[in-house]
Image: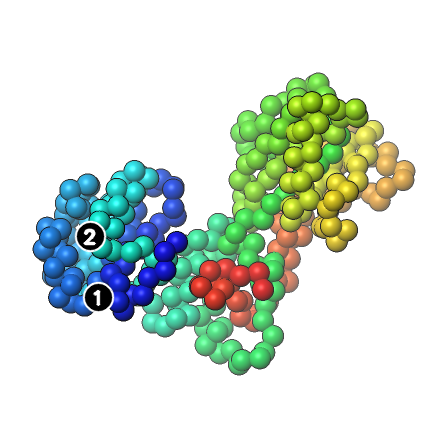
Amino acid sequence: MPTADPVRTPTYTIATPPNSTGAIACLQVRALNAGAMEGFLSRAGLELPVAKPALRDLLGIDEGLAIRWDSTTLDLFPHGGVAIVSMLASALESLGFTRTDEFQYQEATDDHEQRMLSALGRAASPLAADLLLAQPDRWRAHTPGDPLADAGALDRLITPPLVAAFGPPNIGKSTLLNALAGRSVAIVADEPGTTRDHVGATLDLGGLVVRYLDTPGLLAGAAGFDADAIAIARTAVASADLVLLCGDPSTPPVSPPGDSSAAQTVLRVCLRGDLGGPEWDSLPPPDTIVSVREDSGFPHLVRTIRDTLVPPAAIADPRPWRFWGGDGSPTRA
C-alpha cells in the first residue's frame, strides 16, 4: 500500500473490505486544503456544500451518495461491486490522489475511538463488537506501564484463526465440516482418500469466526497425488492455531505432524460417537465426542474450540486490549 503524507499529498481511502462485494462501498477523499477540495469537486462535477449529503454522479462511473464532512474531507458511497470500486480508485489516482489506509471517522472524538472504529470494521467475529466498543474508555483510564489484556488471544476476534482437522481417512472429518458449516462443503463417501486435497471454509463457532481446514486422511503408503496432498496438509496443519486430532471409536487419532511445534494447541475429537465409546487405550480420552448421525456433541465441540482459542477469561478481562500495531493495524505483540 502506498504511503502518503496527508499534509502534502491528496489521498483517498477505500474504507470497505478490499476485493469484496456488498450493497454499498465507501471511499474517503482528502484534499490538501479547502481550495484544493473545491477544485476537485468542480472538475468532478461534485459541487457540494458542507454537511449536506446528496445523490451525485460519481466521476462518470456510478451514481451514489456523496457527503462533504468539512472543507477537506469527502466520502463517496457507490454501489459495492469490486469493479466499480476499482474504477473509482483508478479515476482518483489519475487526478493525483494517492491511496492510503488512514480512514478518518468523523464521529470519533479522539485517537482511541478512531482505532476502535477502524478495528470494528475489520473484525470478523461477532464476539469482538462489545469488547472493542469498551476499549476507548479503558484506554483513557489506562496508566502507562500497567498490564494489558491478552492480545495474543483477543486478536483472533479480528483476524480469524486457523483450525485444522487432521487424522486417518474414512472417520467422518468431511462429514463433520459439512455439519459445522450447515451446508455441503466437503465431498463425503465411504471410501478412504475421498478428500484428496485440503478443503477450507469460514465458520462462525459460537461467535468466533475461524478458518477451518479439512485435510486429507493419512493413507499408509500414499504415492503420487495423494502423497503430495498429504505433504501440503502437514505443512498447513503445522501453522494452524488449533489442531483437531480426529479419530472414531475404533480408530484413534494420529500424532500431529512431525514438523509442528511441540507447544501447538491440540484437541482430541472422537467422531461417529453413535458407534460407541472410543477404544483408545494408549491415548488420553477425547476432549469431545461428536455424532453427526445423532446430532449430538456439537454445542460442546463448538464451545471447546472457541474457548480454547479465545478463553472466556480473556474476554472478561477488564484491562485494555492493544488491538493495533504501530500502523494502526491489529498486533500479536
Residue 38: x and y, percent? 12, 61
Residue 81: x and y, percent? 31, 39
Indicate whether 47 appears above or below 22.
Answer: below
Q: Does residue 89 appear in the picture of this structure?
A: yes
Residue 47: x and y, percent? 10, 56
Circle 2 SS class: loop
Residue at screen point 38% across, 46% down: 18
Q: Say left or right for 226 vs 282.
A: left
Q: Nearer the viewer, residue 185 or 194?
A: 194
Q: Which residue in the protein does label 1 denote? A: 32
Q: Say left or right for 247 vs 124.
A: right
Q: Quadrant of residue 6?
A: bottom left
Residue at screen point 60% across, 60% down: 152
The C terminus: image quadrant: bottom right
Circle 1: residue type = Leu
Q: Nearer the viewer, residue 138 or 170?
A: 170
Residue 195: x and y, percent? 64, 25
Q: Which residue in the protein does label 2 denote? A: 95
Q: Does residue 273 appear in the picture of this structure?
A: no
Circle 2: residue type = Leu
Residue at screen point 57% across, 60% down: 332
The N terminus: image quadrant: bottom left
